[in-house]
Image: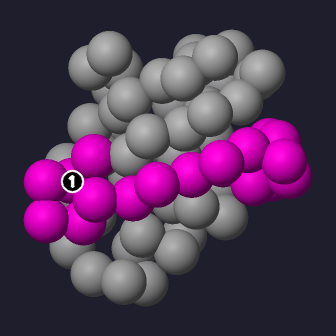
Amino acid sequence: MIVKLAVEKMKCGGCSANVERAVKAQDPYAQVEVDLAEKRVRIESEVPAERMVKAISDAGFPAHVIA
């Protein structure tokens, strides 16, 4: 499944790397595309979106599903 998230507190490359790490901790095989300028993340994974949102939020980057 593909999920798109808004992650408002992402401001730099380090932030996007931390977000990607949080996703990969839930699913090492997930495909992650981070758009730092738009503060969006696209994730292709079998892990439920709610779990990804929680992992990213727990890493310090509040996230919510946009599509």
| Residue sitting nearer the eye, 54 or 16 | 16
Horizontal and vertical percent position of residue 61: 39, 52
Above/below status of 6 relative to 36: above
Query: Left or right of 22: which side holds 56?
Result: left
Residue 24 in the magenta stretch? The answer is yes
Query: Left or right of 4: which side holds 21?
Result: right
Q: Residues within 10 Å of mark 1 (few under 14, many from 20)?
A: some
Please report the residue visible at 32 percent of the width from the left and 16 percent of the height from the top.
Answer: 67
Quarter the N terminus occupies: top right
Task: Give the residues in magenta.
Answer: 23-40
Give the quarter of the image for residue 45. Answer: top right
Above/below status of 6 relative to 47: below
Please report the residue visible at 44 percent of the width from the left and 40 percent of the height from the top.
Answer: 42
Please report the residue visible at 51 percent of the width from the left and 30 percent of the height from the top.
Answer: 53
Horizontal and vertical percent position of residue 2: 54, 23
Would residue 4 be visible to someone looking at this image?
yes
Query: Left or right of 39: which side holds 46?
Result: right
Query: Left or right of 4: which side holds 33?
Result: right
Q: Amino acid at mark 1?
A: Lys
Would residue 54 be visible to someone looking at this image?
no
| Residue sitting nearer the eye, 59 or 19 | 19
Residue under pointer 1 = 39
Please report the residue visible at 40 percent of the width from the left and 73 percent of the height from the top.
Answer: 15
The secondary structure type at the circle numbered 1 is loop
Q: Residue furthest left?
A: 37
Above/below status of 17 relative to 39: below
